[in-house]
Amino acid sequence: MIFCGYAGVGKSTAASKFVRVVDLESTPFQKDWETYARVAKHMSDQGYIVLVSSLNITLTINLFLILLRINNHIFCPNPVKLLTEFLMTRN
């Protein structure tokens, strides 16, 4: 399974507390979302719960479309508007 999450939602905390949960950083991929999505899918196929970044709407949509094309389960929780605005101001 793959989950998208905003900065500050707890991806790194969850990954540090649970076995087989991985917070896949997007920075090393330098906007190569195809590779980022494929790595997330590969890790998910190996039984990991993969937490990916939804830094911005472009990244989220690109990941979602790529992962749909390669037939994987992806969840993109959408926080309530007030929480979204708060999280966006933290960056």
Image: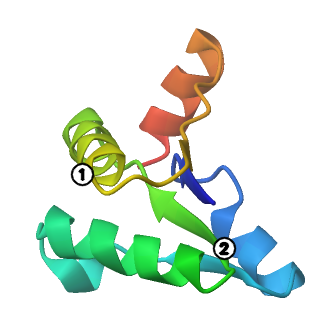
Between marks 1 and 2, how big is the CA–CA gap? 23 Å
Residue at horizontal 26 percent and vertical 36 percent from the top:
61
On the image, the x and y values in percent for residue 55 come to: 35, 49
Q: Quadrant of residue 86?
A: top right
Q: Which one is closest to the eye, mark 1 or mark 2? A: 1
Question: In the image, is 24 to the left or to the right of 58?
Answer: right
Residue at the spot of label 1 = 66
Q: Which residue is mark 2?
A: 12
Residue 30: where, in percent of width, then height? 13, 76
Task: Find residue 16 and report its horizontal and vertical position in percent.
Answer: 78, 84
Q: Looking at the rendering, in which quadrant would you find the N terminus?
A: bottom right
The kind of residue on which mark 2 rests is Ser
- Which residue appears at 16% of the width and 66% of the height? 34
Q: Is residue 63 above or below residue 82?
A: below
Answer above or below: position of 10 versus 76.
below
Badge 2: few (under 14), some or many (20 or more) residues near its Cα, within 10 Å?
some
Left or right of residue 32: residue 11: right
